[in-house]
Each structure stands twice: as structure tokens, then as C-alpha cells.
Image (spheres, rainbow, N blue to C red):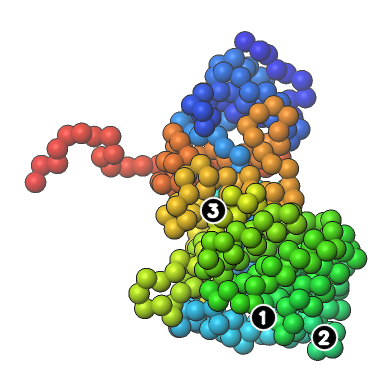
Amino acid sequence: MNPVNDDAASQLLLRGPTLRDGRQVDVLLRAGVIAAVRPAGELTASVETVDLAGHLLLPAPAEPHTHLDKVYSADVVANPAGDLDSAVTAWLSYRPSMTASEIMPRALKAVRAYVRNGATAIRTHVDVGMDLGLRALAAVLEVRAIVARECDLQIVAFISNPVAGRAGDRSRALLREAIAAGADVVGGCPARDSDPAECIDACLTAAGEYGVPVDLHVDEMLDPEPCTLSLLAGAVAATGFPYGVVASHCVSLGMMPPDRAGEIAKRVAAAGIVVTCLPPTNLYLQGREHRSASPRGLTAVRILRDAGVTVAAGADSLQDPFNPLGRADPLDTAALLVLAGHDAPETAYASVSTQARRALGLTTVDVAPGEPAELLAVRARSVRQAIAESTPDRVVIHKGQVVAHTSVVRHGREHDTTPVTP
């Protein structure tokens, strides 16, 4: 036995979880870090202990792309056509009437759902525009303060078009106001601007002034032109932008011939850009004009990975006009990567955990001494089973502390092999 008794208040002992390699272990957490991993039964401690027998212990997932100002609005903002343009039109019509007091409880509910399902880091895009100013941002900043001990919440100032030219003067000024007010990341949608290249340059310039990353909505359409991913790769390479760049969506890359997609992917890799794939929402929105053999609406995941690009995955929208469904569960996103992206379960889980944390500029996690104690314990024997069954029976650990614990009580004949008599 290895006794542990120093600084008990900052320690937590995880008793008996199974690791992905099949080992059953005890894991000691101290001051937000994994202090020890030993075979089950070898650690004793006069500290708080959590029994995780029957649970698989994993690096915690992260949600790299959501929209907390829009969540749970599907019943009040209709999108009967179900496509992206109709969703944008419906949302832009609705959002001027939004108040911070309306947004805040919806956003808080969503964050708590993400945390309950295992996400200990979240990046949310929040609309900033002349028709609503910084009201949505103020609401999500309030949520960030409330959940500070539960998860890391990053806020992207998602500036509305126009951004380029004289018409974008006010938008560019408002973007800077949003960063000064507390937003962590610069966001925008260059493909929908009158001058995508100038929009990209404006976002990189504003981010560079404040020393913050950029996360842009890129090519959220099936049409390969204009290819703003190529423009973004060129701009980042030319400027040497040092603060981190994420290109979210990149749908049209998946519609290009492999040779062209591969050439662009190499430039993206050389520029150090992370691509975030968003299966739930893009599968819902894209390809509706194709009456048969509808495209899947995902980026070229395998081509990007082969080129050396980090590919993260997130859910994007959550029960809003862009996606009427969603449970704020990274395991659902991983399942869609398996089904629609043909990923192996382990690869899919890496995209919602390790690669998602890279997209957020966070330290990656392994279940090993010295690693950050950002962990998910789920009742399963393997990653495949965890994704396949997506049980809510989970324990979520952030900075070495349990921030969510959901237990499932099952009734019925699950383990009864006696035939049912008619």
C-alpha cells in the first residue's frame, strides 16, 4: 500500500476506474493535477474518495464551438425550410428583441448540460452587431462568472457583417469594444461579407491588437467558391499571426476534388490553423437542395488529418433555428463522426477531447501523473461502448474536483435471463 495523507483538503482519490488499455487503477488528484496512477488497491488516503468501479476514465471532452446566445430558442424562432439561409434570416429578424435577462438563463442551462455530460471547457460564439450591440455578450459574461468553478468558458465575439470597407466601420469598432468588454476570441463569417479577404484581414488585425485568438465561421456551404479557407491560410501565413487560429465548419472543402482539397489542407497545416468540424448542425443544414444522394455536409476530415491538420469536433447549435435537436453531449458528436465521417471510435473521441482542447489553446490531457485533472468517468468498458450507449451515468472532474455526478438507477429485467411468460 502507498499511504497518502498530506494536504488532504486539496486531494481526491478515484477508486477503481478502468483505463482505455484495460487496467483497473486508483488515481490520486492533488491541487488540480493527477498526482499518481497505481494498480487498483495500492493507494490509501484519508481524503475524499469516489468509487469508480465499473467506470471508464477518460480525458474530459470539450465543446469547441457552440452559440450560447441562441440555445433552446427553437420553439420561438421557427425555421420551416430547415436550411442555413432560412435559419440566418429567422435569427436576424428575432435577435434585436433579445434581452440579457432572456439570454442568461438559457445559456446557463446549456452550460450546465454540457458540464453534466462531461465537457470541462466550452467555447461559445456570441453575436455582436449594430442591431443588438453587446447585450448578448453581457449575458454570457454573466454566465461565465457564475460557472467559473465548473468549467473553462471562452467567449468569441462573433461580429456581424458587413466588416469590410467603409460599411464595416461600425462593426470593426464594435468588435474592439467586445474584446475590451471581456470577450476572449475574435470571430466572424468572411464568406458572407462583400469582401471576404478584407474581412479576414480586419479580424486578424483586431485580434492582433489585443493579443487574442481568432475563430472564424469558414465556408459553411457546399459551393467550393469562394474558398475563404484558402484566403485564411494565405493571410495567416503572410502575417505570421501568433495567437491561434481556428477555422470552423469548412464544409465546402469536403465537396472539392481530393487533389485540390489536399493542396489547401497542406497550406492550412503549414499555417498552424485548427479546423473544427461540426457534424450535428452541418448534417442538418446542408444538402437539402439535393433530392437524392445528398452530401453529408462535413469537411474533408481525413484529407485534413493526412495533411497534419488538427481536426476538432463540436456540436455547434443546440435546439435553435440552426438545429432543432441536441443534448449538449460531446459523445453524440463523436457518434456522428463515426457514422457520417467513418472515424474509428477512438479517433472520434480524440476529436471531441484532445483535439478540441487544442482548438481552445488548452493543455491536452492524458490519465497520467503530472497531467491536468480534467476527467470524465463514464459507466462503460470501452470508448466504443461509451459512444454507442452514451449513458448519462457519469462523473465529471474539473481542476481536480467533482463538478457533476449523475447516477442512473435501472429497474426491470436487464440481468434476468428467465423467459417472459405470455
Separation of marks 3 and 1 at Cα, in angstroms: 26 Å
Q: Residue at x 45, y 66 (%)?
A: 296
Q: Earlier in the sequence, mark 3 or mark 1?
A: 1
Residue indicated by mark 3:
302
What is the three-letter code of the residue carrying label 2? Answer: Gly
- Taking depth in this image into account, of 54 and 7 the one nearest to the observer is 54
In this rendering, the answer to whether 89 lies above or below 136 is below
Which disc number belongs to residue 192? 1
Please identify the quarter of the rendering in which residue 288 is found.
Answer: bottom left
Which residue is under mark 2?
165
Q: Quadrant of residue 164?
A: bottom right
Question: Which mark is nearer the camera, 3 or 1?
Answer: 3
Residue 365, given in percent of the width and then of the height, sits at 67, 38
The tag earlier along the polypeptide, 1 or 2, is 2
Q: Say above or below: 62 vs 241.
A: above
* Labels 2 and 3: the sequence-earlier one: 2
**Residue 46 location in percent, x, y?**
67, 20
**Residue at image coords 52%, 68%:** 255
Disc 1 element: helix
Under mark 1, the amino acid is: Arg
Residue in the foreground of this view, choosing between 269 and 102: 269
Q: Can residue 305 be seen from the camera position used here?
A: yes
Distance from Cα at disc 1 to Cα at disc 2: 14 Å
Give the structural element (helix, strand or loop) at label 3: helix
